[in-house]
Image: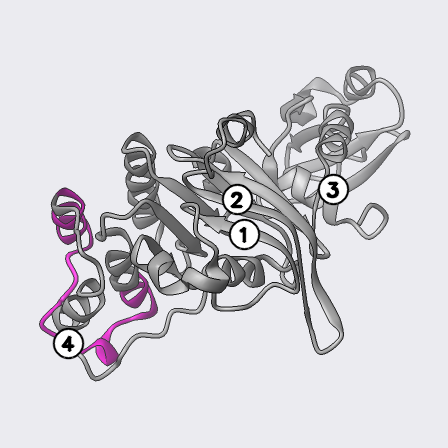
């Protein structure tokens, strides 16, 4: 739990955002969540990342009262979703990972329907989204592309003026310009003091906008010390790109990954700078030692040897 969350609890007040403690959930004898604990305070964007099947969506559905936890406690704006699910949903906007819209409705009819559940809307956000997305709201949803449907779902999720936003894969099917605009809107939510829990597979987008990250693996939050160890290991790795052609790498290193643009991620067995110096300078296009990117942390944590 963060320092801000602990401070709220010390004063005897519930966290005015999201708080999960020792959450457990099973389905038919299969354990999905194993003691999950974290908090999202007002004015914070928390990135919720992990491989498919890690339990992220189940966790999001539990905090909204769509699933019941087997054990542990959940508070959203101080309310327990086991008893106050309807009240929570009036103060919390949720975008599910698999959005399902009404295909027979016209775009504007769907928005009117979806926004009608909330007592307050944010007019500036509505104008921004209408201008940026320019959806044909007079047409029926069935005629929309996947990206257009996602934009419509985002409008229904972000226009309500609520305290908490839970977004499961909000950038699904969006092009680069729409993802950039979504990042801009999320930063505005942060400045307005909203609590945002963001789950996404676009790791670079999450890394750019999130204040901190919660990694979920096999239904458990990865301990901070394991994240620190992963970062330390990554600082010893080399990211490089070579001139086209057959240029063998020097001995004494393991190739970790090869990206589509030809960039290599390599783990030298000794001093990474000394190993890199053994590559002829005229063969080296670019090199980076010691950089730590979220995608690399994610890859390292999910490797079979370390999972």
Secondary structure under badge 2? Answer: strand
Q: Does the CB distance between marks 1 and 2 fall below 8 Å?
A: yes
Give residue 245's position: percent from left, percent from top.
Answer: 69, 39
The main secondary structure of the magenta stretch is helix
Residue identifier under label 1: 74
**Marks 2/4: CA–CA distance:** 37 Å
- Picture disc at residue 19: 2
Q: Does the CB distance between marks 2 and 3 fall below 8 Å?
A: no
The answer to whether any part of residue 204 appears in the image is no
The mark nearer the N terminus, 1 or 2, is 2
Task: Identify which residue is drawn at 16% across, 45% down.
Answer: 128
Secondary structure under badge 4? Answer: loop
**Marks 3/4: CA–CA distance:** 45 Å
Q: What range of the chain is rendered magenta?
A: 124-150
Residue identifier under label 4: 106
Q: Nearer the viewer, mark 4 or mark 1?
A: 1
Task: Identify which residue is drawn at 33% across, 42% down.
Answer: 180
The mark nearer the N terminus, 4 or 1, is 1
Task: Identify which residue is drawn at 69% across, 21% down.
Answer: 289
Give residue 243's position: percent from left, percent from top.
Answer: 64, 32
**Marks 4/1: CA–CA distance:** 37 Å
Secondary structure under badge 1? Answer: strand
The mark nearer the N terminus, 3 or 1, is 1
Q: Quadrant of residue 51?
A: bottom right
Tell whether 9 sits left or right of 101.
Answer: right
Q: Quadrant of the N terminus?
A: top right
**Marks 1/2: CA–CA distance:** 6 Å
Q: Does the CB distance between marks 2 and 4 fall below 8 Å?
A: no
Q: Quadrant of residue 89?
A: bottom left
Q: Nearer the viewer, mark 3 or mark 1?
A: 1
């Amino acid at each position: 739990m963060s320092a801000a969350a602990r401070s709220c609890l010390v004063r005897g007040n519930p966290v005015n955002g999201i708080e999960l403690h020792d959450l457990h959930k099973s389905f038919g004898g299969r354990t999905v969540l194993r003691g999950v604990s974290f908090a999202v305070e007002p004015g914070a964007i928390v990135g919720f990342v992990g491989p498919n099947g890690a339990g992220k969506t189940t966790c999001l559905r539990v905090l909204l009262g769509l699933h019941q936890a087997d054990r542990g406690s959940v508070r959203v704006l101080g309310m327990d979703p086991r008893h106050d699910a309807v009240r929570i949903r009036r103060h919390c906007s949720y975008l599910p990972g698999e959005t399902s819209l009404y295909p027979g409705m016209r775009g504007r009819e769907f928005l009117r329907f979806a926004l009608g559940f909330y007592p307050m809307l944010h007019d500036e956000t509505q104008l921004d989204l209408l201008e940026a997305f320019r959806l044909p709201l007079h047409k029926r949803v069935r005629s929309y592309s996947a990206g257009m449907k996602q934009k419509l779902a985002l409008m229904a999720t972000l226009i309500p003026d609520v305290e908490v936003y839970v977004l499961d894969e909000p950038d699904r099917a969006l092009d680069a310009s729409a993802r950039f605009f979504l990042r801009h809107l999320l930063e505005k939510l942060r400045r307005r003091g909203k609590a945002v829990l963001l789950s996404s597979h676009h790791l670079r987008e999450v890394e750019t906008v999130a204040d901190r990250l919660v990694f979920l693996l096999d239904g458990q939050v990865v301990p901070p010390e394991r994240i620190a160890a992963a970062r330390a290991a990554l600082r010893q790795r080399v990211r490089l790109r070579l001139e086209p052609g057959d240029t063998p790498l020097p001995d004494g290193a393991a190739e970790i990954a090869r990206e589509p643009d030809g960039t290599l991620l390599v783990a030298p067995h000794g001093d990474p700078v000394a190993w890199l110096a053994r590559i002829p300078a005229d063969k080296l296009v670019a090199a980076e030692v010691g950089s730590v990117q979220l995608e690399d942390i994610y890859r390292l944590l999910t490797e079979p040897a370390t999972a």
